[in-house]
Amino acid sequence: MPAAIHVRSSQPDISRRGFVKGLAAIAAVIAVSEGCNGLNPIVVDDDKKNILVLANRGDPPAHFSTLRTSSISLHHSAGAIFGPGNLVMRNRGNMYLVAPYLARRWVSSPDFTEWTFILRRDVFWHDGTQFGPDDVKFWLDLAAFGLKQGDQVRAPAYYTGELAIKQVEVIPPDQVKITLNGPNRFFPDVLADPRIKIDHPRHLMEKQIKDGEINVSPSDVGMIGLGPFKFDSYENGSVIRVRRFDQYFEQDSSGTALPYLDGIDYIITPDAQSMDIAFRTGRLDGTARGFGHYLTETRLKEYVKDLGDSVVFPLMEGGTFRLAFNVLKSGPWQDARVRRAIALWIDKKAAVPLVLDGFGWTSPDVSPNNPVKDKNFVIWPRLDSQDLTANRFEARRLLSEAGFSAGFSMGYLCRAENGLPGGQFLKDQLAGLGIELRLQIVDEAEWNRGRVSLDYDSQSGALSVLPIPEGTEGVYGRASKAPDAYAKHEDLEIDRFYRELKDASTYDRRLDVWTQLQKYLFVDQTYVIPIAEITYIQAFRDYVKGLVIPPEDGHTFTDYATVSLER
């Protein structure tokens, strides 16, 4: 469950360890009742008193298509427009459980290869068209298989490897049967990934595709979604506006229709310092989600100094800072000994202050308090726990054995928006091993294209990993099955591990296979080097009630359907 700290201005403990270890209160909903003590209240017109104003890290890429990118610059607002899930969603009370969303319930075949979802019959697209099983098949076919029409080809969604769908069938009047390539008892958990959103309305796109517009996207059809808020307007570099959808189907426990808000304005703020100024001068109700915009140790102190106890600071476990290799591209890094040497050489603890702004961890015992998560499945911090001096001695031996004692040059795909601290850290670290890391700094468009391509020697990959092992094939699997995988490889042994993982019928067997897989990925082959886990911190005015903050994965619960403003 999410942690939040309501910082008192008298004696705030905001040292890194004190802040993280002092978070004892865990709750699904942040509901703080104290007043704002007259500190910088937001002044709004009467017609905007129920409009939540949030920062957004950047302009949404990929024409607002969640089939094409997992960028939080899109997904922060996509939750409001397209909803927090698809047929299913993560449970707001415990994100590690699966809850119904557009489907009322579901059943599986005995071997877990077929899953039948029974849909709600009170769901409408934002243009008033009723949602049905044909919409699900249209969307899933595009996501899982892509499309070929004449000489035009539309690629599947970047996450298609996670789903492993063989066939989608409509069973009138309200059912959809999904057949998988193999058994997966955790398919609903995988499907509950909040990045997987139904954002391609069949009744608006099918004809365009038949007419040759094979790559039609949500922005081409007016951003018609199924979420609690309908799209109102978008000004590039300025603001995304969404407003309440009166036909939205969700209700609270008392039967009151959601959402509570009249709308949300997402202010585009690519620069974190500009966001801080806007928040601290009363122009924002909440800060952005996204690495580079979450608060640093230094910035948090300034918030507390200026705003005292009129602000709450929700906290969640973030993604992993890592280095991943493209072993399909020729170079010394194709040798597992070289990759292992790099893993042993890097000083992981040094990354916390230098890359993660003081909020992060390399060992689960100093991670945020999250009693719901099973830390037995957090494997990687235990794999390289030896003394750094001994590790570096072994690193030099391995590099010499591989024939690269004189070093070499390697490229690194570096995201200009927020990847420079990590890139510079890795460059400085590897210089000591005689490796020249060339930072290939790219804008958002090239980052989103390049990270799913085979054009770069190495990269960090997108940050978040799904919270269940069975849902991680999309980031650890083979490149041909999982284009958004961190490392680029075609290792069939990874397929075998995931088959065994999905077949595991006991807790102990599941943990055993996951442990073997992690060791294979991070040690035996070292396709990926996990370096440190990130701790994310946002800021919200204390009159923002009903926030549902996930304990991890900042793409979760971005719908804000349960939020209200009590100024």
Image (cartoon, helix red, strand yellow):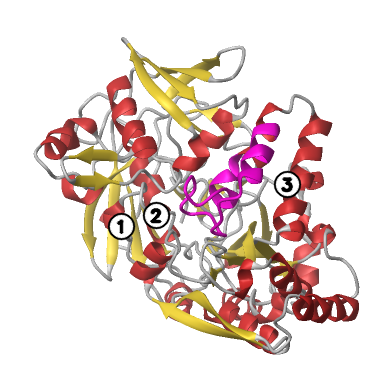
Where is residue 392, by image quadrant?
bottom right
> Of helix, strand and loop, which one carries label 1?
helix
As drawn, 136 above or below 46: above
- Magenta span includes 422: no
Amino acid at circle 2: Thr
Q: Using the image, tell me which numbered label, if any, was put on residue 4.
A: none
Tag 3 and tag 2, C-beta contact below 8 Å: no
Furthest toward the left, the residue is 211
Amino acid at circle 1: Ala
Per the model, the C-alpha gap separating discs 3 and 2 is 26 Å
Q: What residue appears at the point 15 percent right and 40 percent down from the top-left corner?
A: 150
Q: Is residue 348 left or right of residue 100?
A: right
As drawn, 30 above or below 532: above
Camera-nearest label, 3 or 2: 3
Per the model, the C-alpha gap separating discs 1 and 3 is 33 Å
Per the model, the C-alpha gap separating discs 1 and 2 is 7 Å
Q: Earlier in the sequence, mark 1 or mark 3?
A: 1
Residue 47: percent from left, percent from top: 26, 54
Residue named by callout 3: 517
Residue named by callout 2: 69
Q: What residue appears at the point 32 percent right and 46 percent down from the top-left corner?
A: 155
- Magenta span includes 488: yes
Q: Mark 1: give few (<14), some (14-19) or many (20+) Cα within 10 Å.
A: many
Amino acid at circle 3: Leu
Tag 1 and tag 2, C-beta contact below 8 Å: yes
- Could you say which is closer to the camera, residue 329 or residue 457? 329
Q: Which residues are magenta?
A: 471-500
Residue named by callout 1: 62
- Could you say which is closer to the camera, residue 427 or residue 202? 427
Residue 470: percent from left, percent from top: 63, 38
